[in-house]
Amino acid sequence: MSKRKVLQVHPKDNVLVALQDLQKGDTVTFGGNEYVLKDTVRAKHKFVTKDLETGGQVFMYGVLVGKAKQPIAKGEVINLGNLAHAASDFTIGERHLDWHQPDTTNFEGKHFMGYHRSDGRVGTANYWLVIPLVFCENKNLGKLEKALVEDLGYGKTETVDMQSVQLIDLYKNGKSVEEILSADLAHEVTAPKKERLFKNVDGIRFLSHTGGCGSTREDSDALCGLLAGYITHPNVAGATVLSLGCQHAQASILKAEIKKRAADFDKPLYILEQQKIGVTETFLSEALKQTFAGLMQANQNERQPASLSKLCIGLECGASDGFSGISANPAIGYTSDLIVAMGGSVILSEFPELCGVEQNLSDRCVDQKTAERFSYLMKTYNDRAVAVGSGFDMNPSPGNIRDGLITDAIKSAGAAKKGGTSPVTDVLDYPERQSKPGLNLLCTPGSDVESCTAEVGAGANIVLFTTGLGTPTGNPVAPVIKLATNTALAEKMPDIIDINTGTVIEGEETIEQAGARILDYVIDVASGRIEIAAERNRQYDFIPWKRGVSL
């Protein structure tokens, strides 16, 4: 538990954040002032530091995050009943490109061991992809997965599967329902696993999805762009593509999207069309042979030293809480600044969660054209949401609200901390590819799996994913490192959490110390020396974004 009771995030703020549970009637002293609490304030929630009339403005992180729906007394907690979402308007203003560039001395001479590609990018892993161009091929995808994964040594014994075997044995031995429910099932089960045939291929990943036809051409074209982003990704050695033949997402569109991202594309790529080949058995046999041939080529690549400038980090959050913007998000924001200072790249997405901090990000864009594109994408996205009865203010989930993120502006101001303080070098629209070093903004929804899928499609070769409530999210081709915002979560869900930043809340570590520690961990993961939780759990989430309204 933190030794400190409360925290003021920014000098302009008129709320204090409870770092531990505080009781109604308690007197809290901060900054030479005393506050008698009008309510019980649970950890992660906030109370106001002065009386507010109806319409009074609430500031946190130094920005407007809400307006009082009714009078709020000094020492009273803010909640959905008394606070409404509010955010400041923004304009295209002057450029503010000065930033707090961190000292990178401790990382001089460090490198990661990666897979070098002919286009100059470097992968943190080496995967072969099997991709359907349309959902009609998902069943065939499953057949190939069954034929390839176990026999080539990429299988993994699932404890839950082995527990099913134990339950079957109990049933066959005549056990009752009550005995089944009270059975003590073994959680540690050892089973033989085949040796990996291709030592330099980290896995075969199967990107099933529900798109490619039956929706708008915009959706199928965007899907082809996303799939092209994965095929040309530095963590990918090559791909097998299954096409039915008649769908909207044609192979010709996919090839054109690949060329846009890699004009000199030279990875092995096999595209098979079922309606041309005919019999399913023949189709699958050919796909199996070509995939095996591709794996033989992929296996020729080995890890070699690579500069940290070759890192491209996706910045993501999901199941956020009231500590996200205080511990994990600013910590990876410092990691981001370190990477940018060394010539690397970072991608900040989730545009609905940048609501209220647009002015700061717009001012940090390297030129007016970049700022104008950011403004256009933000406003167009929000207008489309409003047109169907929603809006960015609808973004916070019940879990967010329960744990202190009362308005979208509060959530956004904390979420933006992931991007650090460096200038914005580029603004990308989904599913474009990142090509400029530095901080890139990518238009995606706040839905974490859709956003994470898009960040990797844009080129992120590792993702830093912060969470306050816990989520198992992973990705098929890029390691998704999960960071807990609080120690209680890290201890409660150690099977899905990789790094604990609750040490910041507890005063054991500064933001800068945590950010540097995270980068050291990233280097080890990028080098294949650490197996992250999502990989152990085979959490390979892949959800393409349909450009309708998704927050």
Image (cartoon, grey):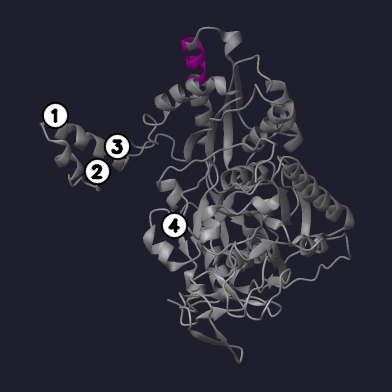
Q: Are marks 3 and 2 in contact (CB under 8 Å)?
A: no
Q: Are marks 1 and 4 in contact (CB under 8 Å)?
A: no
User: Would residue 169 appear left or right of 347 to someone viewing this image?
Assistant: left
Q: CA distance from mark 1 to mark 4?
A: 38 Å
Per the image, is 287 magenta? yes
* Residue 451 percent across, percent down from the top left: 62, 46
Which circle, 1 or 3, is nearer the viewer? 1
Q: CA distance from mark 1 to mark 3?
A: 17 Å
106 in relation to 195, above or below: below
- Residue type at mark 2? Thr
Per the image, is 442 magenta? no
What's the residue at 53%, 64% (across, down)?
518
Residue identified by numbered label 3: 161
Q: CA distance from mark 1 to mark 2?
A: 22 Å
Counting residues from the start of the chain, the first of labels 3 and 2 encountered is 3
- Residue type at mark 1? Lys
